[in-house]
Image (tube, rainbow, N blue to C red):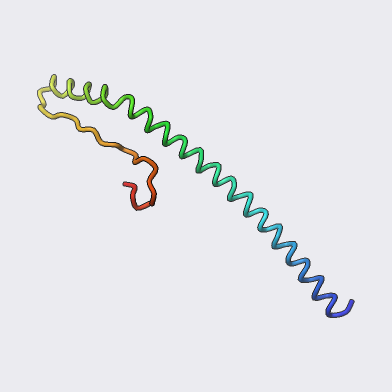
Amino acid sequence: MTDTELNTYNLTERVEKLEQKLDVLIEKLDSVKNGTDKMSTHIDFINNIYTHIRHPLFWICDRVNYMRGYNVTCTEKQLVKEKPSDINDQD
């Protein structure tokens, strides 16, 4: 083999190795995306449950506090924000 052929072979081999590494990275990114989608679905589920039970829950807390002699009313606060646009928007 001449030097030119050897350089061409080495470059071709390096490009193939880089393509394989890129394929592995793309597969890992896809799995991260799937995990993120699952977490988003879970957060939506928890928000939905909280939306349905918050009024009865606060009513019960108010009654228990009244029976204990405390004149404190529970206030509603949304624990998880709806689809935050930025990581800094979250508490």
Residue 88 percent coordinates (x, y): 34, 53
The relative height of residue 27 versus residue 10 in the rendered view (above or below) is above
Side (left or right) of 26 relative to 66: right
Residue 83 percent coordinates (x, y): 39, 42
Residue 11 sits in quarter: bottom right
Side (left or right) of 14 relative to 41: right
The relative height of residue 58 versus residue 38 in the rendered view (above or below) is above
Residue sitting at the far bottom: 3
Residue 77 percent coordinates (x, y): 25, 36
Side (left or right) of 14 relative to 58: right
Residue at image point 42% right, 34% down = 44
Side (left or right) of 21 relative to 11: left
Q: Quadrant of the N terminus?
A: bottom right
Residue at image point 18% right, 21% down = 64
Residue at image point 58% right, 50% down = 29
Q: How many marks?
A: 0
The relative height of residue 6 versus residue 29 in the rendered view (above or below) is below
Residue at image point 23% right, 33% down = 76
